[in-house]
């Protein structure tokens, strides 16, 4: 975790205050840092909310890349063995995105989704465009689709069915906060 982040007394959560960290091309702002230990707590709480609702997914469809860790751990917590991914490119950097989300191959076969209860999992519903697009794709083919995210931004165009926290801050996830170690061919 970067030096400028402060952990809570229990070591599970950290925040960066205004002026301590700035993203390229943006004014100083708060950043919410999700640690690995708090991620475990978040998944258990999110899974418990899904279980309490009575929704039993036959398949967890994770939105790659940010949703990969979320979807896999939710599937374990819910006892759902059937998992799939859909790779959507939208963000190109911090607060930088394409005009519209783009689904990258391979695309899940809609025939394999017929008559299933599908939980669509992602890390964050920021604009909500990615989650809304995948939700619309699924609704055309499944018995029932529900959405689960760790974080939802207040301006998201979609209201996810299951949300762990709402925030208006940039979220630094443990799997992406430090950036790539290197790229193939480097």
Image (cartoon, grey):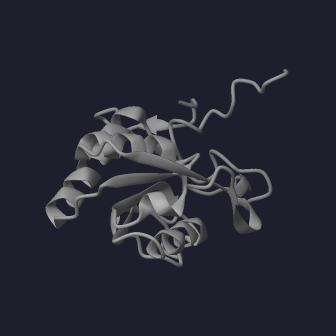
Residue 123 image position (x, y, % from top left): 48, 52
Residue 64 image position (x, y, % from top left): 57, 48
Examine the rendered structure and indicate whether residue 161 appears above or below residue 92: below
Examine the rendered structure and indicate whether residue 96 appears above or below residue 79: below
Residue 158 image position (x, y, % from top left): 48, 76
Residue 164 visible, this orientation: no
Front in this rendered view, residue 145 or 169:
145
Examine the rendered structure and indicate whether residue 110 appears above or below residue 180: below
Front in this rendered view, residue 134 or 3:
134
Q: Which quarter of the figure has residue 41? A: top left
**Split into 4 quadrants, where in the image is the C terminus?**
top right
Residue 23 image position (x, y, % from top left): 71, 50
Q: Residue furthest top?
A: 186
In this figure, what is the number of numbered marks? 0
Residue 56 visible, this orientation: yes
Give the left or right position of residue 64, taking residue 122 as reference.
Answer: right
Front in this rendered view, residue 85 or 34:
85
Give the left or right position of residue 31, taking residue 83 as reference.
Answer: right
Q: Residue furthest right?
A: 185
Q: Residue at x 63, y 33 (%)?
A: 178
Q: Residue at x 34, y 63 (%)?
A: 116
Give the left or right position of residue 46, taking residue 183 as reference.
Answer: left
Q: Residue at x 57, y 71 (%)?
A: 133
Examine the rendered structure and indicate whether residue 181 appears above or below residue 176: above
Q: Which quarter of the figure has residue 7? A: top left
Q: Residue at x 48, y 69 (%)?
A: 138
């Amino acid at each position: 975790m970067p030096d400028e982040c402060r952990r809570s007394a229990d070591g599970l959560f950290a925040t960066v205050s205004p002026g301590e960290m700035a993203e390229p091309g943006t004014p100083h702002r708060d950043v919410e840092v999700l640690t690995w230990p708090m991620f475990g707590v978040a998944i258990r709480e999110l899974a418990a909310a899904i279980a309490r609702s009575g929704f039993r997914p036959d398949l967890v469809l994770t939105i790659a890349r940010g949703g990969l860790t979320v979807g896999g751990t939710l599937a374990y917590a819910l006892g759902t063995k059937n998992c799939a991914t859909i790779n959507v490119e939208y963000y190109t950097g911090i607060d930088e995105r394409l005009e519209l989300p783009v689904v990258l191959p391979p695309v899940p076969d809609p025939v394999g989704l017929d008559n299933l209860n599908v939980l669509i999992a992602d890390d964050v519903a920021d604009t909500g465009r990615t989650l809304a697009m995948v939700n619309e794709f699924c609704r055309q083919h499944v018995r029932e689709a529900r959405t689960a995210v760790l974080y939802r931004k207040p301006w998201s165009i979609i209201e996810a069915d299951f949300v762990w926290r709402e925030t208006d801050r940039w979220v630094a996830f443990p799997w992406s906060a430090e950036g790539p170690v290197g790229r193939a061919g480097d």
